Amino acid sequence: MEPATLQSLRVLFQSNDYIVVDKHWDIRIDSKMWYEKQTVQAQLRHRFPELADPTTYYGFRFCHQLDFSTSGALCVALNKAAAGRAFRCFKDRTVTKVYVALIRGWVDKETQTVDFSIGKNSTEGKTHMMCVGDTEGCENPKPCQTELTVLEYGLYDSSAVTKVLLEPLTGRTHQLRVHCSALGHPIVGDFTYSCGADDAPYRMMLHAHLLHLPLEPEPLLVCAGDPFLPSVDPKWLPQRSVRTLKETVDAVLKRKAEEQRGQREQEEEASRRREEKIKEQRNKAVDETDQTQCQEWLSEWSGD
């Protein structure tokens, strides 16, 4: 619950290609503003000055983004090739990201797919926000999907809250925060999407719990723990458990693995069919050439 410092960087994983850190809440990943001294970029430079790449603007290649208010697993590539491999995973949507959150109220439906489209809010004074597609002033809304699974029901500072697991299937800005707010269950401590009303908690209760990149030859799988425990924050009081975080995450990873296996099989089948078609076309071309040559020989013999 202590604020971030240059020295407080927590490293979850390190290799020659990647570092995964547990980003602190209320800290930017990087900043062009000279007065913002507390950033993940600054923490990395302080901890690993020898790994900073002077050819990049920030010194480190961040593979993805986390909001200022969000904590949890953040992946950093240590070279251009590693950044390219990670970028392809994100581009192909083969990355698995799992978040844990405390949201206001008790959610009735224990598992659901939230599919509100999300666009930029063009309303005066709210241009820093996103919004769902059917609201006034929503520009260029795009389809978005989030899987929501209830873990526990309880109280936070005597108010009803639900602990949930959130899996974004798309990657729109502020997607999880907007989707929860659109459901009528905004994330506890989300100052922005409560219009400044939810300012009592010490942080926004959204945490990037797990990150999985299906890299070759070794996938990257990192867990950033769970900060929403009574032992960490006594204001959170669980009352009824629906399912454990571990079993829910295991189910997500199993489903994702099955989906990717099915996708690989489809790609292999499509590749096999393409090869067969090419082979068939080649054989047809050879047959047509043979037939042409035979006709020419017959014509010559007939002439003789």
Image (cartoon, rainbow, N blue to C red):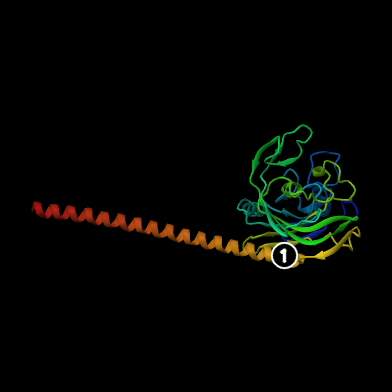
The answer to which of 168 and 16 lies nearer the viewer is 168
Tell me the kind of residue under disc 1.
Answer: Thr
Instruction: Provide residue 128's location: percent of width, then percent of height.
Output: 76, 38
Q: Is residue 216 left or right of residue 188?
A: left
> How many dots with numbers?
1
| Residue 279 seen | yes
**Residue named by callout 1:** 248
Task: Specify the quadrant that holds the N terminus.
Answer: bottom right
Taking the spot 55% from the left edge, 63% from the top edge, the residue there is 262
Instruction: Provide residue 155's location: percent of width, then percent of height.
Output: 87, 58
| Residue 17 seen | no
Instruction: Provide residue 249's location: percent of width, then percent of height.
Output: 72, 64
Q: Give the residue furthest to the front.
A: 108
Secondary structure at badge 1 equals helix
Taking the spot 68% from the left edge, 63% from the top edge, the residue there is 252
Instruction: Provide residue 2's location: percent of width, then percent of height.
Output: 91, 54
Residue 141, relative to residue 98: is it above or below? above
The answer to which of 17 and 159 lies nearer the viewer is 159
Toward which corner of the image does residue 124 lie, by quadrant?
A: top right
Q: Give the residue furthest to the top.
A: 124
Q: Is residue 12 left or right of residue 213?
A: right
Q: Is residue 194 left or right of residue 75?
A: right
Residue 84, relative to residue 241: is it above or below? above
**Label 1 crowd bin: few (<14), some (14–19), many (20+), radius 10 Å:** some
Q: In this view, does 216 lie to the left or right of 53?
A: left
The answer to which of 155 and 272 lies nearer the viewer is 155
The answer to which of 251 and 1 lies nearer the viewer is 251
